Image: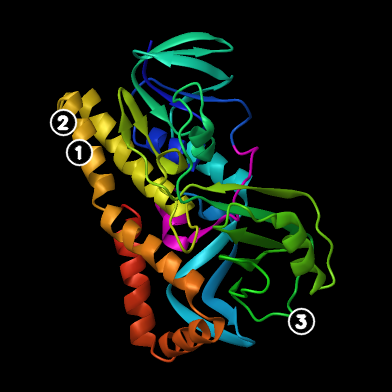
Amino acid sequence: MYDVVIVRGSFAGLAVAMQLRGHRVLVIDQLPIGARQMSSCGTPLATARAVGAEGAVQEVHETFVLHAAGREIQLLLREPYVTFGYHAFCKAMLAQTEAEVWLARASGHADGVVITSQGRVCARFVVDATGWRSWRGTALQPARPVRDAGYGLETELPVRLTERITPGLHFYLEKHLVRRGYAWVFPCGHSTRLGVGSFDPGLRLRPILDRFLGRFGLRTGATHGGVLAIGRGEPAAGDLWVVGDAAGQCLPVSGEGIRTAIFHGIHCGRAIAAALRGNMAVDEARHLYSEQVRSTDRFHHRLLELQTLVAHTPEPLLALAARIVASSPTLTRGIMDRYLVHSGWFVG
């Protein structure tokens, strides 16, 4: 019998577990924690600090560099972003917990009982942190339609492109390259991550990634990626608490999901901890978490609208808009502050 069972040691699942020290917590994952990288591993430096994972940082970036209509536009960031090592970051988060970890597959769930390949476990609370795969149906939830999803594919190569690109995180808003999406180049210490993402479900990303790497004289290596789950689902489904990509908490337009998974995971874990301590009833705690997620729904919807606008705006106009923003540090700070705060800033 556990106080809390968390299915999958994802960023969201580990953020939940970090709030539950002093309680009996079980994390179930089919693979060792930190063994399944699917993202580009970039997040604000403040987020890494909030979860004690600064040691996983590979490189700090002070600028976003946008490429559109043959122009390169640099946006100076008020809050630096970092690229980090996935395994080290997850291990640092796990070290902040007191959770037991099972390498097992969850094969069923009902009324606080989770059936796994290692046996049945009971818990007062069950958290679904299974990521975008939850939309395809898991042992915890039946298959659901993937609404407003994006798709990403990335390769990491042991090269530095310092002679080809300026410092910063690079985004290529080139409509001839990626329809309804973008490509990116993220320096990360001694290596570089290059990827492509699109919100067009009919697009084959591997040929696009190959062409993108070709402009740098590179060949695609091993790849990783997955679904950008931007279609919001219920944060509390029956007796389940759903967090991260499993609840569609990835952001439209940018595809950023690590920060939001950690942000909502912290709030989910704190609400469960309050119920376990008897500070509030279970229904009250569930309502508290749900309302916290819903407080970001309005901005999430605006990002969905912006995503559609960007998809239908000619590339020269996108470049012009970016140049106007970049020309005013005050405007740049204001937009970034609004983006961070309204989509889920870190919790101190």
- At horizontal 36% and vertical 49% (from top left) the residue drawn is 263
Secondary element under disc 2, as helix, strand or loop, is helix
Q: Can residue 22 be seen in this view?
A: no
The residue where tag 2 is placed is 284
Secondary element under disc 1, as helix, strand or loop, is helix
The kind of residue tagged 3 is: Glu
- In the displayed structure, would residue 123 be above or below residue 179? above
Q: Which of marks 3 and 1 is nearer the N terminus?
A: 3
- At horizontal 68% and vertical 71% (from top left) the residue drawn is 177
Cα distance in 3D space between marks 1 and 2: 6 Å
Q: Do the residues labelled 1 and 2 touch (CB within 8 Å)?
A: yes
Which mark, by number, is residue 220? none
**Tag nearer the camera, 3 or 2:** 2
Q: Can residue 310 be seen in this view?
A: yes
Crowd around label 3: few <14 · some 14–19 · many ≥20 (10 Å) = few
- Residue 163 x %, y %: 76, 81
The kind of residue tagged 2 is: Glu
- At horizontal 68% and vertical 64% (from top left) the residue drawn is 189
- Residue closer to the observer: 152 or 347: 152
The residue where tag 3 is placed is 163
The kind of residue tagged 1 is: Leu
- At horizontal 64% and vertical 87% (from top left) the residue drawn is 70
The residue where tag 1 is placed is 288
Q: For the N terminus, give its image quadrant.
A: top left
Describe residue 278's horizontal placement relative to residue 84 as left or right. left
